[in-house]
Image (tube, helix red, strand yellow):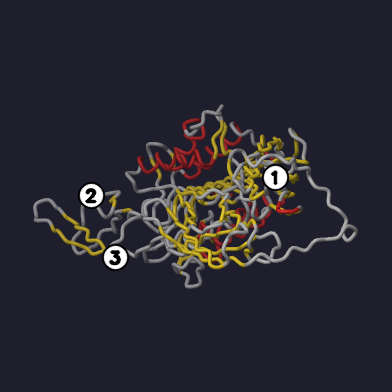
Amino acid sequence: MDLSIIKSSDEINRIAADSEYTPLRFPFKVPRTLKKKSVDVQLSFKQKDFPGLTDNIHIPIKLALPEFAISHQIRDPNNNGIIEQGEIVDLLIRVKNTGGLDADNVKLKVGLDKEGIVYSGPKIIEVGRIAAGQTSNNLIFTFHATRRTIPGPLPLIFTVSQTDFSPRKLPLVLNITKEKAQIINVAGQKKPERLMTVPDLNSNSPPMVFIAMPQDQKRVASTFEIISGVAGDDKGISNIEVRLNGKQFDTTRTILVTASGTGQRQRNFNFKIPLEIGENIIDVTAFDIENLSSSESLTIYRDAEKGELYVAVIGINNYLHVPSLNYARNDAKAFADYMASNMRVDSDHLFELYDDRATIRAMKSLLGTKLRKKAKRPEDTVYIFFAGHGAPEKDSQSEDGDGITKYILAHDSDPDDLYTTALPMHEVARIFSRIKAQRVVFISDSCYSGGSGGRTILAENWRANISSTFFDRIVKAGKGRIILTSSNAQEVSQESDKLGHGYFTYYMIEGLKGKADISNDGEVDIDEIYRYVNKKVPDATNGSQHPMKKGEAEGRVIIGRVK
Protein backbone atom coordinates (compact mmCIF):
# COMPACT_ATOMS: atom_id res chain seq x y z
CA MET A 1 0.00 0.00 0.00
CA ASP A 2 1.32 3.46 -0.93
CA LEU A 3 -0.23 5.22 2.07
CA SER A 4 -0.72 3.99 5.62
CA ILE A 5 -4.26 5.03 6.59
CA ILE A 6 -4.44 5.61 10.36
CA LYS A 7 -8.22 5.98 10.52
CA SER A 8 -10.06 4.34 7.63
CA SER A 9 -13.67 5.14 8.55
CA ASP A 10 -15.81 7.58 10.50
CA GLU A 11 -19.49 7.90 11.35
CA ILE A 12 -21.79 10.81 10.57
CA ASN A 13 -25.05 10.45 12.43
CA ARG A 14 -27.06 13.08 10.58
CA ILE A 15 -26.62 15.84 8.00
CA ALA A 16 -29.45 18.32 7.89
CA ALA A 17 -30.93 19.27 4.52
CA ASP A 18 -29.12 21.98 2.59
CA SER A 19 -26.21 22.00 5.06
CA GLU A 20 -22.59 20.88 5.27
CA TYR A 21 -21.12 18.56 7.85
CA THR A 22 -18.03 19.48 9.85
CA PRO A 23 -14.98 18.31 7.85
CA LEU A 24 -13.78 14.84 8.76
CA ARG A 25 -10.12 14.05 9.15
CA PHE A 26 -8.52 10.85 7.93
CA PRO A 27 -4.86 10.94 8.95
CA PHE A 28 -2.40 8.95 6.87
CA LYS A 29 1.33 8.43 6.72
CA VAL A 30 3.46 8.53 3.61
CA PRO A 31 6.26 5.92 3.68
CA ARG A 32 9.77 7.34 3.55
CA THR A 33 10.57 5.22 0.53
CA LEU A 34 7.58 6.26 -1.59
CA LYS A 35 8.85 7.60 -4.91
CA LYS A 36 5.52 8.29 -6.63
CA LYS A 37 4.50 11.82 -7.47
CA SER A 38 0.87 11.11 -6.59
CA VAL A 39 -1.50 8.46 -5.24
CA ASP A 40 -5.20 7.73 -5.78
CA VAL A 41 -7.48 7.22 -2.76
CA GLN A 42 -10.99 5.82 -3.03
CA LEU A 43 -13.71 7.25 -0.77
CA SER A 44 -16.98 5.43 -0.15
CA PHE A 45 -20.02 7.19 1.34
CA LYS A 46 -22.85 5.03 2.64
CA GLN A 47 -26.23 6.03 4.06
CA LYS A 48 -29.39 4.41 5.30
CA ASP A 49 -32.31 3.91 2.88
CA PHE A 50 -30.57 5.46 -0.14
CA PRO A 51 -27.71 4.56 -2.45
CA GLY A 52 -24.22 5.54 -1.44
CA LEU A 53 -21.48 7.26 -3.37
CA THR A 54 -17.96 6.25 -4.36
CA ASP A 55 -15.38 8.71 -5.58
CA ASN A 56 -11.64 8.81 -6.20
CA ILE A 57 -9.41 11.66 -5.16
CA HIS A 58 -5.96 12.34 -6.52
CA ILE A 59 -3.40 13.33 -3.88
CA PRO A 60 -0.16 14.89 -5.16
CA ILE A 61 2.99 13.85 -3.31
CA LYS A 62 5.99 16.12 -3.01
CA LEU A 63 8.97 13.84 -3.35
CA ALA A 64 11.56 14.28 -0.63
CA LEU A 65 14.69 12.17 -0.58
CA PRO A 66 18.01 12.37 1.25
CA GLU A 67 20.79 13.66 -0.98
CA PHE A 68 24.41 14.03 0.02
CA ALA A 69 27.47 16.14 -0.65
CA ILE A 70 30.85 16.05 1.07
CA SER A 71 33.40 18.70 1.93
CA HIS A 72 36.92 18.05 3.11
CA GLN A 73 39.88 19.51 4.93
CA ILE A 74 43.46 18.22 5.03
CA ARG A 75 45.23 18.28 8.38
CA ASP A 76 48.92 17.59 7.76
CA PRO A 77 52.04 17.97 9.95
CA ASN A 78 53.20 21.29 8.49
CA ASN A 79 49.63 22.70 8.25
CA ASN A 80 49.91 23.76 4.60
CA GLY A 81 46.97 21.63 3.43
CA ILE A 82 49.13 19.79 0.90
CA ILE A 83 49.75 16.04 0.98
CA GLU A 84 53.44 15.34 0.50
CA GLN A 85 55.34 12.08 0.18
CA GLY A 86 56.23 10.72 3.61
CA GLU A 87 53.44 12.55 5.47
CA ILE A 88 50.79 11.09 7.78
CA VAL A 89 47.59 13.00 7.04
CA ASP A 90 44.18 13.34 8.69
CA LEU A 91 41.46 13.83 6.08
CA LEU A 92 38.47 15.55 7.72
CA ILE A 93 35.22 14.80 5.89
CA ARG A 94 31.86 16.44 6.53
CA VAL A 95 28.68 14.99 5.04
CA LYS A 96 25.78 17.33 4.27
CA ASN A 97 22.23 16.14 3.64
CA THR A 98 21.25 18.40 0.75
CA GLY A 99 17.90 16.66 0.24
CA GLY A 100 14.49 17.28 1.77
CA LEU A 101 14.26 14.19 3.99
CA ASP A 102 16.15 13.21 7.13
CA ALA A 103 18.65 10.38 6.73
CA ASP A 104 18.80 7.70 9.43
CA ASN A 105 21.64 5.41 10.46
CA VAL A 106 24.09 7.02 8.06
CA LYS A 107 27.45 5.31 7.55
CA LEU A 108 30.41 6.55 5.52
CA LYS A 109 32.87 4.14 3.89
CA VAL A 110 36.11 5.08 2.18
CA GLY A 111 37.68 3.21 -0.72
CA LEU A 112 41.14 3.90 -2.11
CA ASP A 113 43.55 2.01 -4.33
CA LYS A 114 46.92 3.67 -4.82
CA GLU A 115 50.31 2.09 -4.38
CA GLY A 116 52.27 3.51 -1.45
CA ILE A 117 49.21 4.69 0.53
CA VAL A 118 48.87 3.00 3.94
CA TYR A 119 45.43 3.48 5.49
CA SER A 120 45.37 3.24 9.30
CA GLY A 121 41.88 4.25 10.35
CA PRO A 122 38.43 2.64 10.24
CA LYS A 123 37.15 2.22 6.70
CA ILE A 124 33.53 2.62 7.84
CA ILE A 125 32.46 5.36 10.26
CA GLU A 126 28.98 5.45 11.79
CA VAL A 127 27.60 8.95 11.38
CA GLY A 128 24.08 8.45 12.78
CA ARG A 129 21.19 10.74 11.83
CA ILE A 130 21.61 13.73 9.52
CA ALA A 131 18.55 15.94 9.31
CA ALA A 132 17.61 17.55 6.01
CA GLY A 133 19.83 20.55 5.35
CA GLN A 134 22.19 19.64 8.21
CA THR A 135 25.87 18.68 8.14
CA SER A 136 27.65 16.00 10.13
CA ASN A 137 30.56 16.62 12.47
CA ASN A 138 34.05 16.09 11.09
CA LEU A 139 34.82 12.44 10.30
CA ILE A 140 38.51 11.56 10.40
CA PHE A 141 40.21 9.25 7.88
CA THR A 142 43.95 8.88 8.50
CA PHE A 143 46.49 7.56 5.98
CA HIS A 144 50.23 7.56 5.39
CA ALA A 145 51.56 8.69 2.01
CA THR A 146 54.82 6.76 2.08
CA ARG A 147 57.92 7.95 0.23
CA ARG A 148 57.33 5.37 -2.46
CA THR A 149 53.95 6.91 -3.31
CA ILE A 150 53.98 8.24 -6.87
CA PRO A 151 53.12 11.95 -6.92
CA GLY A 152 49.87 12.80 -8.68
CA PRO A 153 46.13 12.25 -8.25
CA LEU A 154 44.80 10.29 -5.26
CA PRO A 155 41.25 9.15 -6.17
CA LEU A 156 38.97 8.31 -3.25
CA ILE A 157 35.47 6.87 -3.36
CA PHE A 158 33.24 7.61 -0.38
CA THR A 159 30.07 5.51 -0.09
CA VAL A 160 27.17 6.85 1.98
CA SER A 161 24.75 4.18 3.20
CA GLN A 162 21.58 4.74 5.21
CA THR A 163 18.31 3.17 6.27
CA ASP A 164 15.60 2.76 3.57
CA PHE A 165 17.58 3.98 0.54
CA SER A 166 20.33 2.66 -1.71
CA PRO A 167 23.98 3.61 -1.05
CA ARG A 168 25.34 6.68 -2.82
CA LYS A 169 28.92 7.01 -4.08
CA LEU A 170 30.69 10.35 -3.75
CA PRO A 171 34.09 10.61 -5.48
CA LEU A 172 36.86 12.86 -4.21
CA VAL A 173 40.23 13.39 -5.91
CA LEU A 174 43.18 14.67 -3.87
CA ASN A 175 46.75 15.26 -5.01
CA ILE A 176 50.10 13.91 -3.79
CA THR A 177 53.17 16.15 -4.19
CA LYS A 178 56.86 15.40 -3.95
CA GLU A 179 58.49 15.38 -0.54
CA LYS A 180 60.16 18.66 0.32
CA ALA A 181 63.68 18.81 1.71
CA GLN A 182 63.80 18.65 5.49
CA ILE A 183 65.25 21.53 7.48
CA ILE A 184 67.73 20.37 10.11
CA ASN A 185 68.38 22.63 13.09
CA VAL A 186 71.96 22.84 14.27
CA ALA A 187 72.43 22.38 18.01
CA GLY A 188 72.09 25.71 19.76
CA GLN A 189 69.63 27.19 17.27
CA LYS A 190 66.60 25.87 19.08
CA LYS A 191 65.97 24.83 22.63
CA PRO A 192 65.75 21.02 22.64
CA GLU A 193 62.26 19.66 23.25
CA ARG A 194 61.55 17.20 26.00
CA LEU A 195 60.50 14.07 24.15
CA MET A 196 58.85 10.93 25.41
CA THR A 197 61.37 8.10 25.36
CA VAL A 198 60.45 5.62 22.65
CA PRO A 199 62.25 2.29 22.90
CA ASP A 200 63.91 0.82 19.84
CA LEU A 201 61.65 -2.18 19.53
CA ASN A 202 60.98 -4.53 16.62
CA SER A 203 58.60 -3.57 13.84
CA ASN A 204 55.47 -5.05 15.38
CA SER A 205 55.62 -3.31 18.79
CA PRO A 206 52.51 -1.21 19.58
CA PRO A 207 52.70 2.49 20.47
CA MET A 208 52.86 3.84 24.01
CA VAL A 209 50.25 6.17 25.55
CA PHE A 210 50.75 8.26 28.68
CA ILE A 211 48.04 10.47 30.25
CA ALA A 212 49.77 13.21 32.24
CA MET A 213 46.71 14.88 33.73
CA PRO A 214 44.28 14.72 35.44
CA GLN A 215 44.73 11.98 38.02
CA ASP A 216 42.65 8.82 37.78
CA GLN A 217 39.51 8.68 40.00
CA LYS A 218 39.37 12.49 40.24
CA ARG A 219 36.09 14.04 41.42
CA VAL A 220 34.98 17.37 39.92
CA ALA A 221 31.92 19.60 39.81
CA SER A 222 32.75 21.21 36.47
CA THR A 223 31.08 20.27 33.18
CA PHE A 224 34.40 19.89 31.31
CA GLU A 225 37.87 18.51 32.04
CA ILE A 226 41.17 18.95 30.18
CA ILE A 227 42.98 15.69 29.32
CA SER A 228 46.67 15.99 28.42
CA GLY A 229 49.34 13.48 27.54
CA VAL A 230 51.63 12.07 24.90
CA ALA A 231 51.71 9.08 22.53
CA GLY A 232 54.87 7.66 20.95
CA ASP A 233 55.96 4.89 18.61
CA ASP A 234 59.25 3.91 16.98
CA LYS A 235 57.62 3.85 13.53
CA GLY A 236 55.27 6.79 13.90
CA ILE A 237 51.84 7.72 15.35
CA SER A 238 49.11 7.93 12.71
CA ASN A 239 45.99 8.65 14.74
CA ILE A 240 44.64 9.21 18.25
CA GLU A 241 41.07 8.26 19.18
CA VAL A 242 39.12 9.09 22.32
CA ARG A 243 36.12 7.26 23.76
CA LEU A 244 33.84 8.59 26.48
CA ASN A 245 31.88 5.90 28.32
CA GLY A 246 32.38 3.49 25.43
CA LYS A 247 31.27 5.89 22.67
CA GLN A 248 33.71 7.46 20.23
CA PHE A 249 34.09 11.12 21.02
CA ASP A 250 34.30 13.71 18.22
CA THR A 251 37.63 15.36 18.98
CA THR A 252 37.77 17.56 15.90
CA ARG A 253 36.53 20.66 17.66
CA THR A 254 38.06 20.19 21.10
CA ILE A 255 41.30 18.31 20.52
CA LEU A 256 44.60 19.97 19.69
CA VAL A 257 47.18 17.39 18.57
CA THR A 258 50.70 18.68 18.03
CA ALA A 259 53.51 16.55 16.60
CA SER A 260 57.20 16.72 17.43
CA GLY A 261 60.18 14.48 16.77
CA THR A 262 61.47 12.90 13.61
CA GLY A 263 59.00 10.90 11.55
CA GLN A 264 55.97 11.71 13.74
CA ARG A 265 57.31 9.40 16.44
CA GLN A 266 55.67 11.49 19.16
CA ARG A 267 52.37 13.31 19.39
CA ASN A 268 51.36 15.45 22.34
CA PHE A 269 47.62 15.72 22.88
CA ASN A 270 45.47 18.15 24.78
CA PHE A 271 41.66 17.95 24.59
CA LYS A 272 38.56 19.13 26.41
CA ILE A 273 35.97 16.50 27.36
CA PRO A 274 32.35 17.32 28.38
CA LEU A 275 31.49 15.33 31.50
CA GLU A 276 28.24 13.58 32.30
CA ILE A 277 26.85 13.45 35.81
CA GLY A 278 28.43 10.50 37.64
CA GLU A 279 31.11 8.21 36.24
CA ASN A 280 33.04 9.20 33.10
CA ILE A 281 35.40 6.55 31.69
CA ILE A 282 37.81 8.07 29.18
CA ASP A 283 39.89 5.85 26.87
CA VAL A 284 42.70 7.30 24.76
CA THR A 285 43.91 4.98 21.96
CA ALA A 286 46.95 5.62 19.76
CA PHE A 287 47.49 3.94 16.37
CA ASP A 288 50.84 3.58 14.62
CA ILE A 289 51.34 3.55 10.86
CA GLU A 290 50.94 -0.26 10.83
CA ASN A 291 47.55 0.14 12.59
CA LEU A 292 48.81 -1.40 15.84
CA SER A 293 47.27 0.29 18.87
CA SER A 294 47.40 0.63 22.63
CA SER A 295 45.16 2.44 25.10
CA GLU A 296 45.28 4.24 28.40
CA SER A 297 42.18 4.87 30.54
CA LEU A 298 41.13 6.99 33.48
CA THR A 299 37.89 7.63 35.34
CA ILE A 300 36.55 11.02 36.38
CA TYR A 301 33.48 11.49 38.58
CA ARG A 302 31.34 14.55 38.08
CA ASP A 303 29.21 15.54 41.06
CA ALA A 304 25.85 17.07 40.23
CA GLU A 305 25.37 20.74 40.97
CA LYS A 306 22.16 20.98 42.93
CA GLY A 307 19.77 23.50 41.46
CA GLU A 308 16.29 24.54 42.51
CA LEU A 309 13.04 23.28 40.97
CA TYR A 310 10.32 25.84 40.26
CA VAL A 311 6.83 24.92 39.03
CA ALA A 312 4.17 27.22 37.55
CA VAL A 313 0.68 25.75 37.08
CA ILE A 314 -2.22 27.42 35.23
CA GLY A 315 -5.65 25.84 34.82
CA ILE A 316 -8.78 27.60 33.54
CA ASN A 317 -12.30 26.23 33.34
CA ASN A 318 -14.24 29.48 33.57
CA TYR A 319 -13.75 32.17 30.92
CA LEU A 320 -15.43 35.55 30.70
CA HIS A 321 -15.88 35.69 26.93
CA VAL A 322 -15.54 32.13 25.58
CA PRO A 323 -17.19 28.78 26.40
CA SER A 324 -16.11 27.18 29.64
CA LEU A 325 -14.20 23.92 29.97
CA ASN A 326 -15.00 21.11 32.38
CA TYR A 327 -11.71 19.63 33.52
CA ALA A 328 -8.83 22.02 32.77
CA ARG A 329 -8.65 23.13 36.40
CA ASN A 330 -8.77 19.48 37.50
CA ASP A 331 -5.80 18.75 35.26
CA ALA A 332 -3.73 21.63 36.56
CA LYS A 333 -4.54 20.88 40.20
CA ALA A 334 -3.65 17.21 39.73
CA PHE A 335 -0.25 18.19 38.31
CA ALA A 336 0.37 20.68 41.13
CA ASP A 337 -0.56 18.09 43.77
CA TYR A 338 1.76 15.55 42.16
CA MET A 339 4.64 18.04 42.15
CA ALA A 340 4.05 18.78 45.84
CA SER A 341 3.72 15.16 46.96
CA ASN A 342 6.03 13.16 44.69
CA MET A 343 8.61 15.77 43.67
CA ARG A 344 8.44 17.50 47.09
CA VAL A 345 8.19 21.00 45.66
CA ASP A 346 7.77 23.51 48.50
CA SER A 347 4.99 26.08 48.46
CA ASP A 348 7.48 28.91 47.82
CA HIS A 349 8.61 27.10 44.65
CA LEU A 350 5.11 26.15 43.42
CA PHE A 351 2.95 28.87 41.85
CA GLU A 352 -0.70 28.23 40.94
CA LEU A 353 -3.25 30.27 38.97
CA TYR A 354 -6.81 28.97 38.54
CA ASP A 355 -9.90 30.41 36.79
CA ASP A 356 -10.50 34.09 37.61
CA ARG A 357 -7.00 34.47 39.11
CA ALA A 358 -5.46 33.49 35.76
CA THR A 359 -5.89 36.88 34.06
CA ILE A 360 -3.59 37.90 31.23
CA ARG A 361 -1.76 40.27 33.58
CA ALA A 362 -1.30 37.60 36.26
CA MET A 363 -0.10 35.02 33.72
CA LYS A 364 2.49 37.37 32.20
CA SER A 365 3.63 38.44 35.66
CA LEU A 366 4.11 34.82 36.79
CA LEU A 367 5.83 33.54 33.65
CA GLY A 368 7.72 36.65 32.59
CA THR A 369 8.69 38.25 35.91
CA LYS A 370 8.39 35.92 38.92
CA LEU A 371 9.96 32.85 37.29
CA ARG A 372 12.71 34.99 35.78
CA LYS A 373 13.63 36.38 39.20
CA LYS A 374 13.39 33.01 40.96
CA ALA A 375 15.12 30.67 38.48
CA LYS A 376 18.28 32.72 37.96
CA ARG A 377 20.95 30.00 37.98
CA PRO A 378 21.81 27.73 35.02
CA GLU A 379 21.47 24.59 37.17
CA ASP A 380 17.85 25.46 38.12
CA THR A 381 14.88 23.69 36.48
CA VAL A 382 11.46 25.13 35.61
CA TYR A 383 8.23 23.24 34.85
CA ILE A 384 5.30 25.18 33.37
CA PHE A 385 1.94 23.45 33.06
CA PHE A 386 -1.02 25.00 31.22
CA ALA A 387 -4.50 23.55 30.78
CA GLY A 388 -7.08 25.68 29.02
CA HIS A 389 -8.16 27.14 25.71
CA GLY A 390 -5.91 28.00 22.79
CA ALA A 391 -6.91 29.95 19.70
CA PRO A 392 -5.69 30.75 16.17
CA GLU A 393 -5.98 34.13 14.47
CA LYS A 394 -5.27 35.19 10.90
CA ASP A 395 -2.03 37.18 10.72
CA SER A 396 -0.15 37.79 7.48
CA GLN A 397 2.93 38.71 9.57
CA SER A 398 3.09 35.31 11.27
CA GLU A 399 6.63 33.90 11.39
CA ASP A 400 5.35 30.33 10.97
CA GLY A 401 4.62 30.46 7.25
CA ASP A 402 0.91 29.65 7.68
CA GLY A 403 -0.50 33.16 8.14
CA ILE A 404 -1.72 32.30 11.65
CA THR A 405 -0.78 33.52 15.11
CA LYS A 406 -1.46 31.07 17.97
CA TYR A 407 -2.57 32.21 21.42
CA ILE A 408 -2.98 30.90 24.96
CA LEU A 409 -6.19 32.28 26.42
CA ALA A 410 -6.36 33.80 29.88
CA HIS A 411 -9.53 34.02 31.98
CA ASP A 412 -10.27 37.51 30.60
CA SER A 413 -9.16 36.97 26.99
CA ASP A 414 -11.54 38.43 24.39
CA PRO A 415 -11.76 36.51 21.07
CA ASP A 416 -12.52 39.80 19.32
CA ASP A 417 -9.26 41.31 20.63
CA LEU A 418 -6.75 38.50 21.03
CA TYR A 419 -3.81 40.79 20.25
CA THR A 420 -4.44 42.76 23.45
CA THR A 421 -5.97 40.20 25.81
CA ALA A 422 -4.28 36.84 25.07
CA LEU A 423 -0.74 35.47 25.20
CA PRO A 424 0.74 34.78 21.74
CA MET A 425 3.09 31.82 21.43
CA HIS A 426 5.91 34.01 20.12
CA GLU A 427 5.68 35.88 23.43
CA VAL A 428 5.95 32.54 25.23
CA ALA A 429 9.21 31.98 23.32
CA ARG A 430 10.47 35.38 24.48
CA ILE A 431 9.49 34.60 28.08
CA PHE A 432 11.42 31.35 27.90
CA SER A 433 14.49 33.15 26.55
CA ARG A 434 14.49 35.43 29.61
CA ILE A 435 14.69 32.58 32.11
CA LYS A 436 18.31 31.75 32.97
CA ALA A 437 17.61 28.14 34.02
CA GLN A 438 19.03 25.75 31.42
CA ARG A 439 16.08 23.39 31.75
CA VAL A 440 12.59 24.76 31.06
CA VAL A 441 9.85 22.21 30.39
CA PHE A 442 6.51 23.49 29.05
CA ILE A 443 3.60 21.03 29.33
CA SER A 444 0.41 22.07 27.56
CA ASP A 445 -3.00 20.39 27.57
CA SER A 446 -4.47 22.78 25.03
CA CYS A 447 -4.73 23.15 21.26
CA TYR A 448 -4.76 25.82 18.60
CA SER A 449 -6.47 24.31 15.57
CA GLY A 450 -9.82 26.06 15.95
CA GLY A 451 -11.66 22.73 15.77
CA SER A 452 -14.84 22.01 17.70
CA GLY A 453 -15.25 19.82 20.75
CA GLY A 454 -11.92 20.47 22.46
CA ARG A 455 -9.69 23.00 24.17
CA THR A 456 -9.62 25.52 21.37
CA ILE A 457 -11.87 28.27 20.04
CA LEU A 458 -12.24 29.80 16.62
CA ALA A 459 -11.91 33.56 16.76
CA GLU A 460 -13.14 34.02 13.19
CA ASN A 461 -15.39 32.16 10.80
CA TRP A 462 -12.72 30.00 9.13
CA ARG A 463 -10.89 26.78 9.68
CA ALA A 464 -7.20 27.02 10.55
CA ASN A 465 -4.49 25.03 8.79
CA ILE A 466 -1.87 25.13 11.52
CA SER A 467 1.90 24.75 11.11
CA SER A 468 3.84 23.32 14.05
CA THR A 469 6.74 25.70 13.44
CA PHE A 470 5.78 27.77 16.47
CA PHE A 471 6.77 24.86 18.72
CA ASP A 472 10.22 24.83 17.14
CA ARG A 473 10.62 28.53 17.78
CA ILE A 474 9.89 28.04 21.48
CA VAL A 475 12.44 25.24 21.99
CA LYS A 476 15.07 27.36 20.23
CA ALA A 477 14.49 30.21 22.70
CA GLY A 478 17.27 28.93 24.95
CA LYS A 479 19.35 25.96 25.98
CA GLY A 480 17.39 22.97 27.30
CA ARG A 481 13.88 24.12 26.31
CA ILE A 482 11.41 21.21 25.98
CA ILE A 483 7.73 21.17 25.01
CA LEU A 484 5.33 18.32 25.74
CA THR A 485 1.94 19.09 24.25
CA SER A 486 -1.30 17.12 24.28
CA SER A 487 -1.81 17.00 20.50
CA ASN A 488 -0.17 17.96 17.25
CA ALA A 489 -0.87 21.32 15.66
CA GLN A 490 -3.82 20.15 13.52
CA GLU A 491 -5.65 18.17 16.22
CA VAL A 492 -8.10 18.91 19.01
CA SER A 493 -7.20 18.20 22.65
CA GLN A 494 -10.19 16.43 24.17
CA GLU A 495 -11.72 16.08 27.63
CA SER A 496 -13.39 12.96 29.06
CA ASP A 497 -16.40 12.96 31.37
CA LYS A 498 -15.60 9.38 32.34
CA LEU A 499 -12.02 10.24 33.38
CA GLY A 500 -12.81 13.68 34.78
CA HIS A 501 -9.73 15.05 33.01
CA GLY A 502 -8.31 15.79 29.63
CA TYR A 503 -7.11 12.53 28.06
CA PHE A 504 -3.54 13.76 27.91
CA THR A 505 -3.23 14.89 31.53
CA TYR A 506 -5.01 11.82 32.88
CA TYR A 507 -2.55 9.43 31.26
CA MET A 508 0.40 11.69 32.01
CA ILE A 509 -0.37 11.64 35.75
CA GLU A 510 -0.97 7.88 35.55
CA GLY A 511 2.43 7.47 33.92
CA LEU A 512 4.19 9.75 36.41
CA LYS A 513 2.86 7.64 39.27
CA GLY A 514 4.76 4.64 37.95
CA LYS A 515 3.30 3.15 34.77
CA ALA A 516 5.76 5.08 32.58
CA ASP A 517 8.78 3.99 34.63
CA ILE A 518 10.14 1.59 32.01
CA SER A 519 13.57 1.40 33.65
CA ASN A 520 12.03 0.56 37.07
CA ASP A 521 14.44 2.93 38.83
CA GLY A 522 11.73 4.86 40.69
CA GLU A 523 12.11 7.89 38.42
CA VAL A 524 10.26 8.98 35.27
CA ASP A 525 12.14 11.09 32.75
CA ILE A 526 10.68 13.23 29.98
CA ASP A 527 11.29 10.58 27.32
CA GLU A 528 9.60 7.84 29.36
CA ILE A 529 6.47 9.91 29.96
CA TYR A 530 6.31 10.92 26.29
CA ARG A 531 6.51 7.30 25.15
CA TYR A 532 3.72 6.42 27.58
CA VAL A 533 1.24 9.19 26.62
CA ASN A 534 2.07 8.73 22.94
CA LYS A 535 0.73 5.19 23.23
CA LYS A 536 -2.18 5.71 25.62
CA VAL A 537 -3.74 8.93 24.29
CA PRO A 538 -4.15 7.83 20.63
CA ASP A 539 -5.58 4.50 21.83
CA ALA A 540 -8.11 6.25 24.06
CA THR A 541 -9.15 8.78 21.39
CA ASN A 542 -9.40 6.36 18.46
CA GLY A 543 -6.32 7.85 16.85
CA SER A 544 -7.61 11.42 16.77
CA GLN A 545 -5.13 12.90 19.26
CA HIS A 546 -1.37 12.45 19.26
CA PRO A 547 0.86 14.08 21.90
CA MET A 548 4.03 15.73 20.65
CA LYS A 549 7.45 16.40 22.17
CA LYS A 550 9.92 19.00 20.96
CA GLY A 551 13.39 19.94 22.20
CA GLU A 552 16.23 18.31 24.12
CA ALA A 553 18.33 18.98 27.19
CA GLU A 554 21.69 17.73 28.36
CA GLY A 555 21.44 14.66 30.54
CA ARG A 556 18.32 12.95 31.81
CA VAL A 557 15.38 15.24 32.60
CA ILE A 558 13.51 13.76 35.57
CA ILE A 559 9.89 14.88 35.65
CA GLY A 560 8.45 12.37 38.14
CA ARG A 561 9.27 10.09 41.07
CA VAL A 562 7.38 6.98 42.08
CA LYS A 563 6.42 6.71 45.74
Left or right of 323 on screen, residue 276: right
Q: Is label 3 or label 1 in front?
A: 1
Q: Residue at x 51, y 68 (%)?
A: 399
Q: Earlier in the sequence, mark 3 or mark 1?
A: 3
Disc 3 packing (10 Å; few <14; some 14–19; many ≥20): few
Q: Is residue 431 visible?
A: no
Label placed on residue 37: 3
Q: Residue at x 40, y 50 (%)?
A: 163
Left or right of 410 on screen, residue 213: right
Judged from the image, the secondary structure of the residue bearing numbered disc 1 is loop
Left or right of 218 on screen, residue 416: left
Q: Position of residue 203 (x, y in %)?
A: 64, 42
Q: CA distance from mark 3 to mark 1?
A: 58 Å
Quarter of the image where one finds residue 230: top right
Label placed on residue 310: none
Q: Position of residue 151 (x, y in %)?
A: 58, 66
Residue carrying label 1? 233
Residue carrying label 2? 11
